[in-house]
Structures are given as C-alpha cells and as structure tokens.
Image (cartoon, helix red, strand yellow):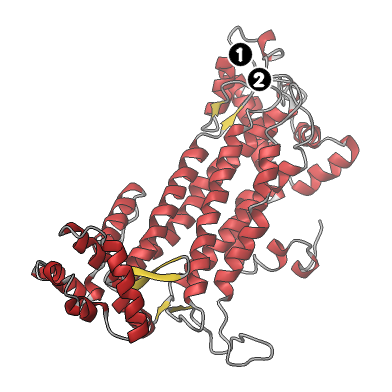
C-alpha cells in the first residue's frame, strides 16, 4: 500500500486543486485508478452474466466472479501487472485466483483487452457525466440564472471593441452565459448518452464469439445491456473514437464558455471600471507588496485552467487515428482524459463559490453609464432621422457627435438648434423623444430577454429556481 502526503504528489490537481476533501472524494469515485479498475471489473462481470444468460456458464460462476471483484484492490492488480506487463491480463489473473477451477475459463471469455478498456471507459464517463459533471454544471447554471434575474433591470453600458456602445442590462449580459453554458450542458448530456462499448474481439469482427454464437452481435448487446450501454455501430479492436472525441469536445467547449465569462468578469473588476467584485475574505491578501490590492484571482484561475486543459483537445483529436485495426499510440494519451474532467469540475466549483457571493457595484455601473450617456443617443437619433426621410442621417449625426465632443453641448441640444434637422425633430413621437431625453431607457428588450433566456434553459435543463 503506497501512502504519501498530498504535497509529495506531482500533479497540481492533486496537491492544490483538490484540497477540498468532499470534491476530491467525488472526483476519485469515478476518475481515480481505483475507479478505473472497478469499472473494468464490472465489464468482466457483465460478460459472465451474459454468458450465463445464454447458457454458456452457470449462475454460480456469476456469483463467484461478483464476489471475487468485490475483493480486488488496485495494489494487487498493479503488483500482478509488474509480472504480466499487461494491465487487463493482470486484472483477469487476479479475478481467476479467487474463483473455482470451473469458473476460471469464463473470465474474459472470447474478449480482447480493449473490449474491456473501451467499454469500461465509456461506462465510467457516462456515469461521471450523469452523476457528477452535469449536476455540477447545472448548479453553476442555476447561480447564473439567479444573477440574470436579479440584475435584469440594472442598466449597464454595453461594450463592443472595449468601447462604450448602447445600453444593456447587467442581467442581460449574464443571460448570454446562461444561454451559452446551457447549450454546452445539453451537449455534454447528449454526448455522454451516446458513449458506446464493444464486445467484438481482437479486430472487431467477432471472430472468437462467433465460435459459440450464430449471432454474436446479439451476445454483445446482452453484455452491454448489463451496463446500460449500446454497441459501437462498427468496431475494430477499439470502439469508434468519435464517440469519446465528441464527449471530450463538449467538456472543453463548456470550459471555453466559463473562460469567456471569467474574462468578462475580471475586466469588469478593473479599477477604472469596478462594476463587479469577488467576495474578499478578511484575511485575504491581494499582493505581496501592495496591501490595498484586491485581485480577481478566481476568474483569472479559471481562465488559466482553461489554458492548461483546452490544448488537450488536440491530443484527443489525434487519438482518432489508429493504424488499421488498432495501434498503441493512444494508450498513454487517453489516460489523461480524467484530468480534463477534474480540471473542468475544479473550475466550475470555484465559480459556484465565487458567483454565489458576486458583488455588483450599482453606483459604479451607473457612473460608467453616465460617462457617455449623451453619446448613446447617436444610434437612435440617426435611425429616427432616417425613418423620417433624412437622405444621409448617419453622416449628419456623425458630424453632430464631433461637434458635441468639441463644444461640450449635448447631441439633443445641437439637433434642436439645427435648422436643417428641426423638421425631423418636430416629427418625433413622445416615446421616441423619451428615449432621447432618457438614454437609460434605450435598452430594447434586454430585461425581457434575460427573463426569456432563463425561462427557456430552466425548462430545458429541468432546473428549478427558488
């Protein structure tokens, strides 16, 4: 039994980003080496169950194998692998040591190692998605929904290219991420449901199982049904790699949405903007030399984690290539998929904690809006002039904005002085005039859109709001 301090570990995922014991235990249940061996054992058990169902072995064999795998330890399997230099043969040997002579022949019967490996991976990633990943993503989605609804009427200056644009609301801005993240949660759910297994032998042609079954695909279906999986439409020694590729892509894409959200939030936390802030603990330090600083460390951490794990997707794409019926070029690289999952979950859990305590500075939001609110009316003004027949409304308003910046007078004041534009100004309705006089009301349907987005995704993802 290997025992070491977490601070002797090499991966930051173990010694830094899994310090919360409850999170580490959740991750470990599905993604540890112990879990991997447990899932591989479950496939071996499903195999003998299907053999018994088809009259090849007895139910007593099933009982023996079930008892044997309940006693297995990863330490034992790894010790055996030192001798066999083959992980699945080591697992099989360890199971066979614990069963009767009558049961031994049926363990791993007609299968190849990657019948077990690929099927076990599909099973554990499917269950990880259903029981851990998706519920955690939905928890963050709910927090974002609550912010969007709470701030749906908080007028905020819109920004494009880093410049002030026309107004939105802060809730509308957050609803963007409710929608984007909602799409990704749905993609994770669908791609996880579609993960496949195989029990088709060394090259996928059912060579061995066809010795005993006239319809070996039906036997394969029986084995996989025990695990709640379907068979890959076609397999070689491995399952078609696109199923797992699509699943991991959905995770990385979801991670990208969180990186984008975090980037937005950290920029809104800049000193000169100051519209949002992270909760800051009473003993927390922002800088080793500048005691006044409060850095957006959590949002920066999420972006940094995304930068670390996003490039792994390239390796997953490379694992789509396997020579002929299979080579070993994915044997090491595919083992790092659990790290991608843990990296994502670590960041999601961090954002849940941060966003639950998100501080919105309404005074600064208002101050930033008012900084350029007179220029905001340029868009509605030009559109209204055009609607009343002005032949070159955009240019007319552009010139007025330059004059306003130089003279300090408002656009509304300048247009009323303009003899050329006076006829158009006099045609404005009360509603149109109101938008020009009160630019903070020029928010379109931002508030309603935030509500609609939240309603749509809460229903689609079955998220119940308080």
- Check disc 2 and report the residue beneath it: 200
Q: Residues within 10 Å of mark 2 (few under 14, many from 20)?
A: many
Q: Which residue lies most toward the front here?
A: 419
**Front in this rendered view, residue 334 or 173:** 173
In this picture, residue 245 sits left or right of residue 445: right
In this picture, residue 235 sits left or right of residue 134: right
Q: Quadrant of the N terminus?
A: bottom right
Residue 303 placed where, x, y %? Answer: 59, 64
Question: In the figure, 396 relative to 361: above or below?
Answer: above
**Front in this rendered view, residue 434 or 463:** 434
- Check disc 1 and report the residue beneath it: 216
Residue 9 placed where, x, y %? Answer: 78, 64
Q: Quadrant of the C terminus?
A: bottom left
Q: Are marks 2 and 1 in contact (CB under 8 Å)?
A: yes
> For the point 15% across and 59% down, which residue is it?
388
> For the point 27% across and 58% down, which residue is it?
449
């Amino acid at each position: 039994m290997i025992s070491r301090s977490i601070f002797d570990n090499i991966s930051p995922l173990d010694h830094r980003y899994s310090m919360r014991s409850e999170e580490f235990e959740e991750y470990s249940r599905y993604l540890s080496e112990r879990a991997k061996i447990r899932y591989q054992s479950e496939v071996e058990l499903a195999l003998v169950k299907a053999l018994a169902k088809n009259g090849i072995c007895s139910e007593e064999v099933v009982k023996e194998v079930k008892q044997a795998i309940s006693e297995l330890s990863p330490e034992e399997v790894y010790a055996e692998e030192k001798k066999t230099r083959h992980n699945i043969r080591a697992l099989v040997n360890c199971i066979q040591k614990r069963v009767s002579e009558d049961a031994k022949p049926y363990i791993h019967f007609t299968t190849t190692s990657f019948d077990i490996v690929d099927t076990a991976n599909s099973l554990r990633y499917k269950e990880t998605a259903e029981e851990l990943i998706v519920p955690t993503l939905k928890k963050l989605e709910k927090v974002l929904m609550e912010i969007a609804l709470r701030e749906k009427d908080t007028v905020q200056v819109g920004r494009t290219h880093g410049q002030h644009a026309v107004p939105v609301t802060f809730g509308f801005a957050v609803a963007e991420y409710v929608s984007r993240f909602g799409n990704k949660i749905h993609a994770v759910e669908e791609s996880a449901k579609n993960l496949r297994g195989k029990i088709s032998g060394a090259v996928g042609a059912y060579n061995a199982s066809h010795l005993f079954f006239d319809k070996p695909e039906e036997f394969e279906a029986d084995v996989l049904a025990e695990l709640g999986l379907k068979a890959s439409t076609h397999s070689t020694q491995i399952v078609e790699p696109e199923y797992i590729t699509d699943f991991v892509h959905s995770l990385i894409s979801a991670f990208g949405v969180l990186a984008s959200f975090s980037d937005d939030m950290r920029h809104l936390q800049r000193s000169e903007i100051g519209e949002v802030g992270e909760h800051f603990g009473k003993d927390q330090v922002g800088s080793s030399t500048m005691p006044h600083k409060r850095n957006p460390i959590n949002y920066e951490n999420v972006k940094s984690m995304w930068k670390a794990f996003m490039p792994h997707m390239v390796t997953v794409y490379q694992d789509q290539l396997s020579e002929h019926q299979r080579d070993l070029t994915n044997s090491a690289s595919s083992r790092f998929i659990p790290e991608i999952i843990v990296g994502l979950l670590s960041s999601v859990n961090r954002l849940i904690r941060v966003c639950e305590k998100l501080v919105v500075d309404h005074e600064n939001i208002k101050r930033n809006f008012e900084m350029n609110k007179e220029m905001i009316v340029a868009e509605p003004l030009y559109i209204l002039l055009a609607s009343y027949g002005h032949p070159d409304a955009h240019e007319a308003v552009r010139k007025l904005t330059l004059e306003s910046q130089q003279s300090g007078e408002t656009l509304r004041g300048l247009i009323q002085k303009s003899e050329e534009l006076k006829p158009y100004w006099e045609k404005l309705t009360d509603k149109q005039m109101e938008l020009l006089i009160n630019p903070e009301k020029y928010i379109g349907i931002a508030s309603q859109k935030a509500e609609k987005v939240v309603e749509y995704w809460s229903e689609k993802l079955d998220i119940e709001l308080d």
